[in-house]
Image (tube, grey):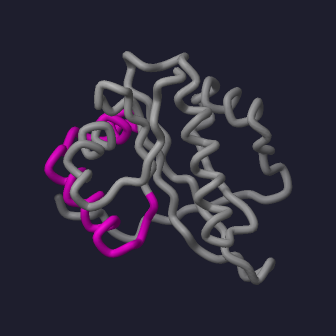
């Protein structure tokens, strides 16, 4: 999609992006929670804890978003970014928007001094895996990644 603008979200964009963020969470089998999604994004943006890129059409419609979390790698002793969320609204899929968001995410990560970006996706999300691999991402076959739930957030 050539008339698309990729821009950085501000706290005032949390409501708009929150609608897509809520759909993204539902894709990963979470209950719908639009107020919670908006509040979460607003807090991350307000506190400078994440970088959210928005894909917006020339008509001002939000087509997709991605969210980066700047962090560090102690082995590399350098900043990295975790691309945690990438979502394109159903009406806008298969138009190259996700690839444009990935490109914008890479530019933002580099601008912040990151030496690498990392991401994870569901084993069943084969369309995302094809996109990532076609844009230069390499699946990690050297490390297992583990997670442990410490508590369930209160809605």
The residue at the point 53 percent across, 28 percent down is 97
Q: Foreground: 129 or 117?
A: 117
Query: What residue span does the magenta drawing correspond to?
Result: 23-51
49 part of magenta stretch = yes
- Residue 147 spot, x, y in % from top left: 55, 62
Q: Which quadrant of the rendered structure holds the C terminus?
A: bottom left
Q: Foreground: 63 or 131?
A: 63
Q: Quadrant of residue 26?
A: top left
- Residue 23 spot, x, y in % from top left: 31, 34
Q: Residue furthest right?
A: 142
Relative to 6, say whether 91 is above or below.
above
63 part of magenta stretch = no
The residue at the point 37 percent across, 38 percent down is 24
Main SS, magenta region, reads helix
The residue at the point 32 percent across, 75 percent down is 47
- Residue 96 spot, x, y in % from top left: 58, 24
Relative to 12, say whether 128 is above or below.
above
């Amino acid at each position: 999609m050539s008339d698309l603008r990729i821009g950085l979200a501000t706290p005032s964009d949390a409501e708009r992006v929150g609608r897509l963020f809520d759909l993204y969470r539902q894709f990963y089998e979470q209950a719908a929670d639009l107020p919670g999604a908006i509040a979460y994004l607003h807090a991350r943006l307000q506190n400078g804890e994440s970088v959210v890129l928005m894909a917006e059409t020339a008509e001002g419609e939000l087509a997709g978003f991605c969210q980066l979390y700047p962090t560090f790698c102690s082995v590399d002793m350098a900043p990295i970014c975790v691309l945690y969320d990438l979502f394109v609204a159903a009406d806008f899929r298969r138009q190259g928007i996700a690839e444009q968001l990935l490109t914008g995410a890479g530019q933002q990560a580099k601008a912040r001094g990151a030496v690498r970006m990392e991401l994870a996706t569901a084993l069943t999300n084969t369309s995302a895996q094809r996109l990532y691999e076609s844009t230069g991402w390499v699946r990690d076959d050297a490390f297992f990644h583990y997670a442990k739930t410490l508590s369930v957030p209160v809605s």
